[in-house]
Amino acid sequence: MAENIRGCFCVGWHAQVRSGNADISEFKAASTALSLIAKYHSHVDLIGLMSRLAREELVHHEQVMRLLKKRKIELRQLSAGRYASGLRKVVRNHEPVKLVDTLVVGAFIEARSCERFEALVPHLDEELGKFYFGLLKSEARHFQGYLKLAYQYGDAKDIAQVIDRVRAAEQELIESPDIEFRFHSGVPA
């Protein structure tokens, strides 16, 4: 099943990249990092990591915009997919576990991005392949950063349960039919 999903994803997403019909995930990631900074302003380590992450994501956003312009591809606005919002539904709504859950969800999103960039790179021309390989390495660092913070602010036993809960929600999102094709889509319907 996973290979079928990966294959459908690569072909479809590659077509979206070439046509400019792609969401700007980097901008959304920067926004998430900034909202964590605003909400958890007393968590110094979180602020340090999230501010670096937000800056890096905004640089990626600018790079994407330059690539679209260079290739004369018009940017089209897309609605958000269901993946991230679906994962955020499992976040508990009381502190301090809300922060930990949010960080685990962030780690999953970054790890899945890394995986999907890796699957996509071989299907791209040299310039885009090099760019997306760089994004892949960034997403891997971001994944590790989110998870490190989760363990710093949470209890390891609880985090293991959160990971199981998020993993189950993610599996359902990835394996179920999805009518909107996005970077983090499920199986195309």
Image: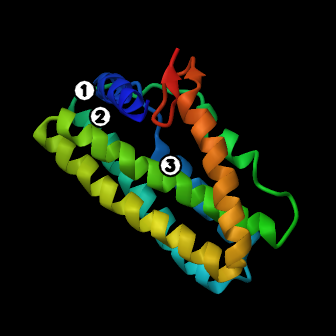
Crowding at mark 1 (Cα within 10 Å: few <14, some 14-19, many 20+): few
| Observer able to see residue 125 | yes
Mark 3 belongs to which amino acid? Answer: Phe
Q: CA distance from mark 1 to mark 3?
A: 20 Å
Coordinates of residue 155 in the picture (x, y in percent): 72, 78
Left or right of 14 on screen, residue 102: right
Crowding at mark 2 (Cα within 10 Å: few <14, some 14-19, many 20+): some
Residue at the image position 32 percent from the left and 54 percent from the top: 136
Crowding at mark 3 (Cα within 10 Å: few <14, some 14-19, many 20+): some
Mark 2 belongs to which amino acid? Answer: Leu
Q: Secondary structure at mark 3?
A: helix
Q: Quadrant of residue 173?
A: top right
Q: CA distance from mark 3 to mark 2?
A: 15 Å
Residue at the image position 78 percent from the left and 64 percent from the top: 98
Left or right of 138 on screen, residue 88: right
Residue at the image position 46 percent from the left and 48 percent from the top: 112
Mark 1 belongs to which amino acid? Answer: Lys
Q: CA distance from mark 2 to mark 1?
A: 6 Å
Among numbered discs 3 and 2, the one appearing first in the sequence = 3
Residue 72 image label? 1
Which residue is more in the foreground, 104 or 23? 104
User: As displayed, is residue 94 above or below residue 170?
Assistant: below
Q: Nearer the viewer, mark 1 or mark 3?
A: 3
Q: How many marks?
A: 3
Residue at the image position 47 percent from the left and 69 percent from the top: 144
Name the residue tied to disc 2: 68
Q: Can you name the residue that lies furthest to the top here?
A: 189
User: As displayed, is residue 45 above or below residue 58?
Assistant: below
Q: Can you name the residue that lies furthest to the front here?
A: 1
Name the residue tied to disc 3: 27
Q: Quadrant of residue 180?
A: top right
Which residue is more in the foreground, 125 or 189? 189
